[in-house]
Image (cartoon, coloured by chain):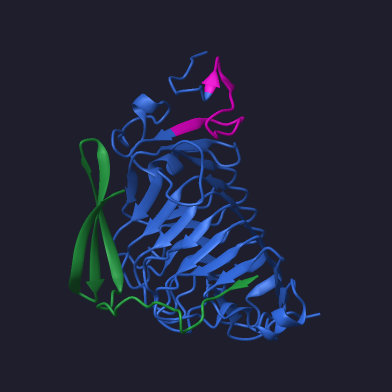
Chain colours: A green, B blue
């Protein structure tokens, strides 16, 4: 089975800064594990985010 | 004989019990609790749990069907690759009933400096099993190209997730390096729809890499292969050489899903650097590709069951008689 969208209908996200690696650090807040994701382009940090893990 | 204090009972009066997905076993049971445990403990109850999976591995006996239980409330962070050479050891993540992804029991390796850390886990033993665990690698050491290296024999993975968020544009990196003999994967998820990759960056790399090992008679059932490709050269299952698959590589009911919001549509879900000469790939009729042009590259010994005859073939899904 093959499922595709036509190129015409394809919605492409805006081009973001290239990310080569996403590092993760784990920690707890009120007994819930969180993850800090550090988006890297080579040695440069592109962005950071914190989410429930 | 002591009763353990594990809910639902790992053992009762010394007799192993079923429950919580924990297999009945003739072996010993060890506990891993990264948040509350210590590698100075004996690991034999939840109140004396080990902290790391590597410590638990060092404690189990080979060929005794020992079981390692991992608490599902935190990520076990390893500081070096675990080389899993023992046989018949069973790892179970405990976070309720198992799913395809989002397992609560997670084992991760971050950035290390050792060239020997090619993955979080390298399995070379026989008849080991892993259930309901997410394997994570964020390692950026140059040699750390893989999440898990499967190079054992008759390994079985149930409801495991393989995730590698580093080397996203490295053609030689992959979530899973598959050089195992008779490895089986059920209800597993390999890759991510969130992290955009460049180059081939396979989810499963079949290239014979581990000395003396190669992919032979491997099987995937009801597995998800996920991607967000930046262009057409992304391949979900890839081997560089004509002899990378020996005998059989079968996919049953598997989905190769490329996030349509990515910039690229991969040309093929399964492709090799050369047609396979020592084995073949088979995808059953319930395999599907999403936002991928074809299931397999034509003429490479990749067999796909046709669902609607000529139309299917014309769409580029390789079918070889």
Tell me: residue A31, above or below residue B86. Answer: above
Image point (18%, 70%), residue name: A45
Q: Position of residue B54 (x, y in %)?
A: 40, 46
Place of residue B291 in the rendered image (x, y in percent of width and height, measured from the top left): 52, 75
Q: Give B292 or B174, whichever is nearer the viewer.
A: B292
Image coordinates for residue B77, horizontal then vertical, percent: 32, 49
Q: Is residue B258 above or below residue B9?
A: below
Q: Is residue B306 above or below residue B108?
A: below
At a point 20% along the width and 36% down the height, the residue shown is A30
- Is B14 contained in the magenta span? yes
Left or right of B130? Residue B277 is right
Residue depicted at 33% across the width and 42% down the height: B74
**Can you give x and y, in whole percent of width and height, for residue B287 in the image?**
65, 66
Q: How many marks?
A: 0
Q: Is residue B247 left or right of residue B21?
A: right
Left or right of B264 on screen, residue B311: right
Q: Quadrant of residue B73?
A: top left
Q: Quadrant of residue B254?
A: bottom right
Q: Is residue B212 visible?
A: no
Q: Which residues are magenta?
A: B11-30
């Amino acid at each position: 089975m093959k499922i595709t969208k036509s190129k015409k209908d394809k919605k492409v996200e805006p081009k973001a800064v290239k990310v080569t690696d996403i590092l993760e650090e784990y920690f707890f807040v009120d007994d819930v594990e969180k993850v800090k994701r550090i988006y890297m382009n080579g040695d440069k940090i592109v962005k950071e985010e914190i989410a429930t893990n | 004989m002591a009763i353990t204090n594990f809910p639902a009972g790992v053992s009762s009066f010394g007799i192993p019990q079923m429950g919580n997905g924990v297999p009945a076993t003739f072996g010993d049971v060890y506990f891993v609790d990264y948040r509350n445990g210590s590698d100075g403990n004996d690991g034999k109850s939840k109140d004396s749990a080990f902290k790391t999976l590597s410590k638990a591995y060092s404690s189990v006996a080979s060929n005794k069907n020992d079981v390692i239980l991992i608490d599902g409330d935190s990520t076990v962070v390893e500081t070096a690759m675990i080389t899993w050479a023992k046989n018949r050891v069973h790892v179970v993540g405990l976070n309720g009933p198992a799913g395809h992804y989002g397992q609560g029991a997670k084992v991760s390796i971050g950035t290390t400096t050792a060239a020997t850390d090619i993955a979080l886990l390298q399995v070379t033993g026989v008849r080991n099993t892993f259930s309901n665990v997410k394997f994570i690698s964020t390692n950026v050491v140059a040699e750390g190209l893989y999440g898990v290296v499967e190079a054992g024999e008759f390994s079985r993975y149930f409801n495991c997730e393989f995730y590698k968020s580093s080397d996203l544009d490295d053609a030689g990196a992959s979530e899973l390096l598959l050089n195992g003999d008779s490895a089986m994967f059920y209800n597993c998820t390999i890759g991510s729809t969130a992290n955009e990759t460049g180059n081939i960056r396979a989810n499963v790399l079949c290239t014979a890499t581990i000395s003396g090992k190669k992919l032979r008679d491997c099987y995937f059932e009801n597995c998800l292969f996920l991607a967000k490709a930046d262009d057409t050269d992304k391949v979900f299952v890839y081997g560089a050489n004509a002899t990378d698959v020996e005998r059989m590589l079968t996919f049953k009911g598997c989905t190769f899903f490329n996030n349509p919001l990515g910039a690229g549509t991969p040309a093929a879900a399964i492709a090799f650097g050369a047609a396979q000469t020592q084995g073949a790939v088979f995808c059953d009729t319930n395999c599907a590709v999403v936002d991928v042009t074809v299931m397999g590259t034509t003429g490479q010994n990749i067999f796909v069951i046709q669902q609607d005859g000529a139309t299917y073939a014309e769409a580029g899904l390789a079918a070889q008689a």
